Amino acid sequence: MYFGPFSSYEEYLKELERFHGKKAPGGVLALHMVSLARELLPEGILMDVICETRKCLADAIQLLTPCTVGNHWMKIVDTGRFAAVFYDKQTGEGVRISLGMERLKEYPAVNEWFLKLVPKKDQDLDAILEGINRAGAALFDSSPVMVDPKVLQVRPKVPPVICPVCGEAYPPYHGPVCRGCRGFTEAYFREPAGARTEK
């Protein structure tokens, strides 16, 4: 079993709880997914990851590998699926690993937790974690993949530009106006009337 920078399962679980906020079964599933990825990929490659969910899996990958959102070695393409593509950042060759729904049925406590068939208050966390650890890699489907060459392109580091609307700095490749002012993202905050400070 691969524990990344941690010496044991217990040490990983403790750090997962600290970093993620709880002993999340998804973080333990991720431990087995990352271990499987290391078995399936050649040794010594520079690995990047595309994580298909913003939930537990993303945090665990950041704990277990050098791939983080901040260093751009992990990208999140939020399909909502418990899956990830682990690949050689030079060649794009890799493997997609996903939680197998048919496989899950063989582990009732894990199946009930993942598919939310039992209310959270009635779930037995120890039984769920024990089921995940007993099953390990048997819970996952995997297939070789080739990452789209566009994903492999490294954007050149260029100085930011100032948005003519809000006056804040942003990457010039986003266009003539920042994405926030263009409405590219959903509004996630609002300022009370009169609260904006002078530029």
Image (cartoon, rainbow, N blue to C red):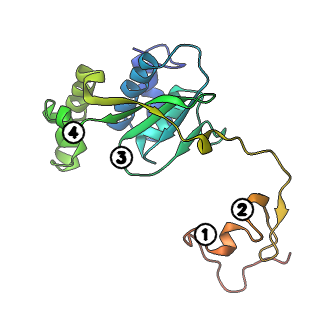
Image quadrant holding the C terminus, namely bottom right
The residue that mark 4 highlights is: 101
Q: CA distance from mark 1 to mark 4?
A: 34 Å
How many discs mark residues in the rendered view?
A: 4
Q: Percent x, y for residue 31? A: 40, 26
Q: Is residue 39 left or right of residue 74?
A: left
Sort mark 3 into few (<14), some (14-19) or many (20+) by Cα contacts within 10 Å: some
Q: Percent x, y for residue 147? A: 52, 37
The residue that mark 2 highlights is: 174
Q: Nearer the viewer, residue 191 or 170?
A: 170
Sort mark 2 into few (<14), some (14-19) or many (20+) by Cα contacts within 10 Å: few
- Residues marked 3 and 1 touching at CB (< 8 Å): no
Q: Nearer the viewer, residue 40 or 125?
A: 40
Q: Residue type at mark 2?
A: His
Q: Label 2: state its secondary structure.
A: helix
Q: Label 1: state its secondary structure.
A: loop
Q: Residue type at mark 1?
A: Phe
Please tell me the numbered disc located at residue 81.
Answer: 3
Sort mark 1 into few (<14), some (14-19) or many (20+) by Cα contacts within 10 Å: few
Q: Earlier in the sequence, mark 1 or mark 2?
A: 2
Q: Residue furthest bottom?
A: 193
- Residues marked 1 and 4 touching at CB (< 8 Å): no
Q: Residue type at mark 3?
A: Arg
Please tell me the numbered disc located at residue 184.
Answer: 1
